[in-house]
Image (cartoon, helix red, strand yellow):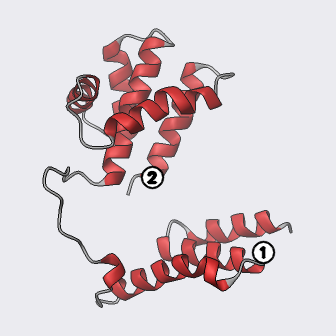
Amino acid sequence: MSDIEDLRKKLKEADGSIQATLVAVIDHLRQAGLETELTAPLSNLYFALLDTSEGRSNPLLERSAMETGASKKLVMDTLQWSMAAAAVTVLKEEAKWGLTTALAHVARRMRFDTEQLKEYRKNIMKGRSPEGARTNYDSFVIADRRKYKDISAEDFVDIMLTKGQALKQ
């Protein structure tokens, strides 16, 4: 079995467990010959997660003071909502879907409320979105779309939404 096949097997066995996934990646990197000092940050993250799962606090995962004006929305939430808004735009502008149809399709796939997605997308377009949302949106609509320029808009959106669903917690 190749190294990557072995890693794929271990990741499947991890079955979505963040800790088991980290252990599989760390082991893979070490077996590939990476020095311990290069994998240490991942090991430290694993140990911090283990500490918190067992009720201990760990300075690595302690919450820091929120910056004034910073969004309270989690980074992953911002990423997923931005991805969904971008998917609507790609369907609307490239595939020529109606806005209502595109919103309903994306919202259903991501299990988002259609009206909330409509508002979120509108806020991105008007520059009233959480920090990082417009950057994420542009990345999906422009940079990521260039990577997949040879496939249809619908297929590209399907790839985006499949990734987005996999990231949902």
Asked whether, in this view, residue 131 is left or right of residue 17, the answer is: left
Q: Residue 16: percent from the left, percent from the top?
A: 51, 65
Figure check: 165 above or below 5: above
Q: Which of these two is toward me, 12 or 50?
A: 50
Q: Residue furthest right?
A: 1
Q: Residue furthest left?
A: 68
Query: Which residue appears at 36% of the width and 17% of the height?
Result: 101
Asked whether, in this view, residue 86 is left or right of residue 12, the answer is: left
Asked whether, in this view, residue 78 is left or right of residue 119, the answer is: right
Query: Which residue appears at 52% of the width and 41% of the height?
Result: 162
Q: Residue 66: percent from the left, percent from the top?
A: 17, 62
Kind of residue sitting beneath label 2: Leu
Residue at the disc numbered 2: 167
Quarter holding residue 87: top left
| Disc number for residue 32 | 1
Distance in Å between CA atoms under marks 2 and 1: 27 Å
Q: Residue 79: percent from the left, percent from the top?
A: 38, 45
Query: Which residue appears at 55% of the width and 67% of the height?
Result: 15
Query: Which residue appears at 47% of the width and 27% of the height?
Result: 141
Quarter holding residue 23: bottom right
